[in-house]
Amino acid sequence: MLACSAFAQSNVVDLTILHYNDFHARLLPSDQGLGGAAYLASAINQERKSCPRCLLLSAGDSVQGSPVSTIYRGLPVFEVLRPFNVDAFALGNHEFDYGYDRINDFMAAAGTPVLAANFLNPDGKLFTGAASVIVERDGLRIGIVGALMQDLVPGLASPSKLGPNQMTATLDALRAEAARLKDKTDIRIALVHLWKEGCDQIVRELPEYAVTVSGHDHGGLQAMFQVEDRVGVRVKSYGVELGRLNLSYDKTTHKILKSDWRRIPVTTAAYQPDPVVAKLVDKWEAKVNLVVDTPIGVSNSAHTRDQTRKWIELVMRERSGARFSFMNSGGVRDVLPQGQLMARAVWNIMPFDNMLVMGQVPGKLIPAFIRGDSELDPDKLYSVASIDFLVEGWRNSKDPALRDFGAAMPLEGPFLRDALLDWIKAKKTVD
Ligand SMILES: [Zn+2]
């Protein structure tokens, strides 16, 4: 009996997975003292101290969301994250924002594998060079497999950002890679950047993965998503939370015997900034300070995301003279705060280099979500303002009516962000 239980015990090991997702270039903490690369680094270092068998995973969308990222096309973010010693990055949809070629620069700067099992170059080879990585921790062989959503184009990235490369079916790619790793690993982790449903589906339908660490949905999870012994985890975006998943795992039965998950709030009150990371953050922020930390006006109220979106649509109409305007809520990345407005606030709201475009479109082609209740003459031309990103999406839509509408809209115009900055500078106040 004793010998038997001692033997069983030796196959049960502990593993801790630290993880974050959707960092979105938020190098500095928010005005509320949440997040910040140097504080996230400290939280990670703190957790590592009580973590004998420990992994750090990043589930995609490291870039896009602050002036440093926009001005320097994402690269400084990977330089700042390098001292984190991440074990593997998943590729997120926003890693495509500066074009697929830029991903090669990200990989060089990351100094750690960037995993994408379902992203192929024109030769049919893995674009990032790796679908998975095997990490060994004190006798435990851990297979980490990365993947992202197949439907990247046109909803999340324009066709030109993907270039001649292609996305393949996410779950098929994960299944194939798990089969390849089966005999070489004791446990497998899916590290994915996917819509919520896809993340849950892996936990439900791919038992070859004990753990699914995911990103893309910025809200994070309140509790682990569990199916039998398998678990899925995801934290809030912008580096304001670090996830810590503790597992007790049986190498023989390939089952998780015990799991607990904590979301650790990353705040400036709770941590001292990590000096190495802080130095890198300061270096890059100093470069953009002169551009973005200048006062441009005052906001009389704290806007919600939808109020901010409506303000953008107002600016679009006033700047272009268009009768109708449309901005998607997903493209509004932050809100107009109350009080003094710095240019940075606008950069945070509109980090993308989207262009404000205006077309003359026959009434019959204008979709209901843009014309609202207005009664339009089907053959008369009306002016419509939007952004080039959405026009590209409409042109590539499955819906023929949207394709016709997209074809009637141009792709060129001034930067929307400049229009927003100019509007505040001219009016001095936003209600
Ligand atoms: Zn995403």
Image: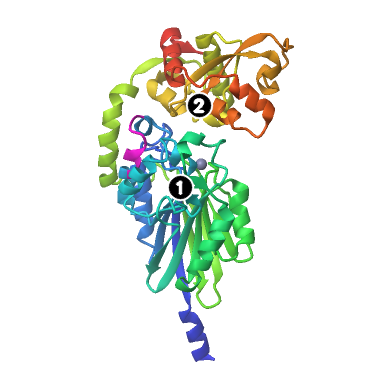
Single out the residue that lies furthest toward the front.
123
- The amino acid on which the numbered mark 2 sits, given as a three-letter code, is Val
Q: Quadrant of the image for the N terminus?
A: bottom right
Please state the horizontal and vertical placement of residue 169, each as a whole percent of the image: 58, 52
Q: Which residue is mark 2?
A: 335
Quickly name the residue at label 1: 122
Circle 2: element type: loop
Looking at the image, which is closer to me, 300 or 144? 144
**Nearest to the observer: residue 360 or residue 204:** 360
Residue 47's place in the image compared with 25, above or below, is below
Provide the residue span drawn in magenta: 71-78
Task: Say few, some or many: other residues with alpha carbon within 10 Å of mark 1 (under 14 / 14 to 19 / 20 or more).
Answer: few
Q: Is residue 224 visible?
A: no
Q: Which mark is residue 171?
A: none
Along the polypeptide, which appears first: circle 2 or circle 1?
1
Q: Quadrant of residue 101?
A: top left
Q: Quadrant of residue 395?
A: top right
Three-letter code for the amino acid on which mark 1 is drawn = Pro
Q: Is mark 2 within 8 Å of ligand 1?
A: no
Q: Is residue 40 visible?
A: yes
Q: Residue 132, how many percent across, how many down?
A: 44, 60
